[in-house]
Amino acid sequence: MEMKLPGQEGFEASSAPRNIPSGELDSNPDPGTGPSPDGPSDTDSKELGVPKDPLLFIQLNELLGWPQALEWRETGRWVLFEEKLEVAAGRWSAPHVPTLALPSLQKLRSLLAEGLVLLDCPAQSLLELVEQVTRVESLSPELRGQLQALLLQRPQHYNQTTGTRPCWGSTHPRKASNNEEAPMREQCQNPLRQKLPPGAEAGTVLAGELGFLAQPLGAFVRLRDPVVLGSLTEVSLPSRFFCLLLGPRMLGKGYHEMGRAAAVLLSDPQFQWSVRRASNLHDLLSALDAFLEEVTVLPPGRWDPTARIPPPKCLPSQHKRLPSQQREIRGHAVPRLTSAEDRHRHGPHAPSPELQRTGRLFGGLIQDVRRKVPWYPSDFFDALHLQCFSAVLYIYLATVTNAITFGGLLGDATDGAQGVLESFLGTAVAGAAFCLMAGQPLTILSSTGPVLVFERLLFSFSRDYSLDYLPFRLWVGIWVATFCLVLVATEASVLVRYFTRFTEEGFCALISLIFIYDAVGKMLNLTHTYPIQKPGSSAYGCLCQYPGPGGNESQWIRTRPKDRDDIVSMVRKGLSDFSSVLAILLGCGLDAFLGLATPKLMVPREFKPTLSGRGWLVSPFGANPWWWSVAAALPALLLSILIFMDQQITAVILNRVEYRLQKGAGFHLDLFCVAVLMLLTSALGLPWYVSATVISLAHMDSLRRESRACAPGERPNFLGIREQRLTGLVVFILTGASIFLAPVLKFIPMPVLYGIFLYMGVAALSSIQFTKRVKLLLMPAKHQPDLLLLRHVPLTRVHLFTAIQLACLGLLWIIKSTPAAIVFPLMLLGLVGVRKALERVFSPQELFWLDELMPEEERSIPEKGLESEHSFSGSDSEDSELMYQPKAPEINISVN
């Protein structure tokens, strides 16, 4: 189907330029080969079924040296952003957002309107292209020959080869031979070529002053088929566009600025989309006019034109700029989306299959199983990646640390009824089983602070009433498993829709503070048991001396590797993938090298229960009367609330649409697995396990997939999580095998493992919106960051919302730390009630920006009430544009 731009129908018959060969107007470029107007991101194009156009590399070659020795020299290049050649410094500038003078765009439009426009030019070489461009009536044969010789001259490229001095390409005239048309060796070795994706194309702009021309000469060419035009560009790429801007001398940098304007136009996604499908001069000028209508003008005297704007952290969406034809194409090309994609497109509260009631007993569980079975083989094949190996090492050490720490705490809380061995065995068995059967295998099961508090209270209750602890604990576990199965059967997991960001952030902040508090507390305790020696002491077997007046005698020798850019890139990537593991190894190596007297990781050497005299299976009654098996239902009810809240809040956080998970969630299946494992661990006398929020987030973040930063200045785009089961499974297998790795693990210092706890807690706490709003309380208004919520909610209302969250967090911490901790599960559930009560204090618009809307609240608001935030109608409102910006995971732990 032929594509037409606005106004094309009435203009096409009469406005074809007279200097365009008629045969070159017959065909249109295939709409399926053009760029996505959303710029470098492929997400929208793939979701909507619109093929993405090749990335375009634009180079500006300027004609310099008039009138002595004319030569073409590369002075700028564009992919997404502009890079200027800094000749004196011998390098390319940092990528920056280009700024243009408005007269340069206006002069360019006038020159193109009166110049030569060739669309779908059939040229197959630079010689044929030059002959087509110089076929202008105003040029005499002599001038045409001189101009052709000049255009065929090989340009000088700035070749920054690794380990050598910057060099320039030769300027010898080009002859029309096949050898001369072959790409130069420097083009193939250009490091920029490795940063461009396969299928990238080139566009060249030639601009400059030419004294023998009496009037300006402008030409714009779109090649029918992209062709490698020899060494015209610094990178060997097939060229699609060619723009020539020459003319007599003028004041200022007229042609230089017009050349930059043409290059910036070609680098603009919307202009490029339109010009790839243009049929005539009118279409080209319409695309340029559309660009001019969106230009932002900076007033003179308020802006330094030499200032360079750095690239933004996140490119704004191009949705509002879509041409009408492109909207029509996208409207017809929308395929049927998966459940994950549908949730991502319609917001976090859109009805998703995982949270819809079926009305049948165990209906949600059956749906979860049916949803996850087709993905099961890929859950193992998708793990065949080096990134997964790094994640295994990192999460394994975190899991072992957690097992050691909570095992020791559990031993103290139960007077040796359970210990480190049970913690290792339970972590391995429960974690591996969960990874094999769960709906969200990225979840890491572990002992958690709230559950540990409940275990301590349960043991104290058993001791006070002279009960046999493990049999009574077994019945509590049986009742908890029963209650959880009832919740699964009745599809109670759909209630997680009421767990908004208010509840998630409160729970996540609490767990993060527990991690930080425990890590700092343990490290402070080490200062008493293992005091830090003063400088000059040889207690650790080493003597540290300050450098004398002569300075430090050590010298650093800087080496310059042969292939510096490639090696540095590989090293940087390796350090990024294994940063946490390398930090741990560095700590272990430093400890061993200095011979520091630090506590080491203690792993049980014998495979037997910690409590002497008991077997692995717990007796159902022991010395307890039978009726205690019924009375255990009361504490089990409280524990069931805690397990449900702890498990499902973590599940909601991990399955947020911002993570772009493609394989769906499994809230009912996960709770079912936790119930079965609760029964198993209770029967074996092992600790109870539930989803660990911080470690699970660290696991997911270690598996982040990001786009390769192709263009200079382009930031990697978040693509999603590497969803698979193998990393968690291997982590828990290694945890179980750690019992037999005591000779190796005994060299790991405990302070290193405490550092892991501290790092995960601080990273999780510092990246949630709640922490950002707490910082606003102590920050003057003029120094506050330009947060999106501050544009729509008064600062006093933001502070009020934050104060309420702080009060809830403080109350949870106090209850957790006092004998009243038995009601801690009810207080977690109370967070949902507090959030519901906030609807009477804050308006829906304020809650939308500060938190999220609950299902009933969202349905009660007229559709038009939040139209600017939810709709994609392309309105001009600021809210609409802001909501188009891609969302990144709010809770984010930077591991890699």
Image (spheres, rainbow, N blue to C red):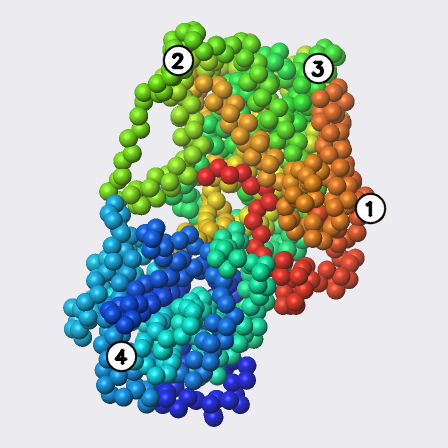
Q: Position of residue 692 (x, y in %)?
A: 58, 33
Hey, what amino acid is under mark 1? Val
- Are dots 4 and 3 in contact, CB under 8 Å? no
> Which image quadrant for residue 807?
top right
Evaluate whether residue 19 shows in this view: yes
**Is the residue 517 above or below the residue 530 in the image?**
below
Q: Residue at x 60, y 26 (%)?
A: 516
Marking on residue 147: 4
Hey, what amino acid is under mark 4? Leu
**Side of 643 where 831 appears, left or right:** right
Q: Earlier in the sequence, mark 3 or mark 2?
A: 3
Q: CA distance from mark 1 to mark 4?
A: 75 Å
Residue denoted by label 3: 460
Q: Secondary structure at mark 1?
A: loop
Residue denoted by label 2: 545
Which of 303/624 is in front?
303
Hey, what amino acid is under mark 3? Ser
Foreground mark, 3 or 1?
1
Q: Secondary structure at mark 2?
A: loop
Q: Position of residue 478 (x, y in %)?
A: 66, 28
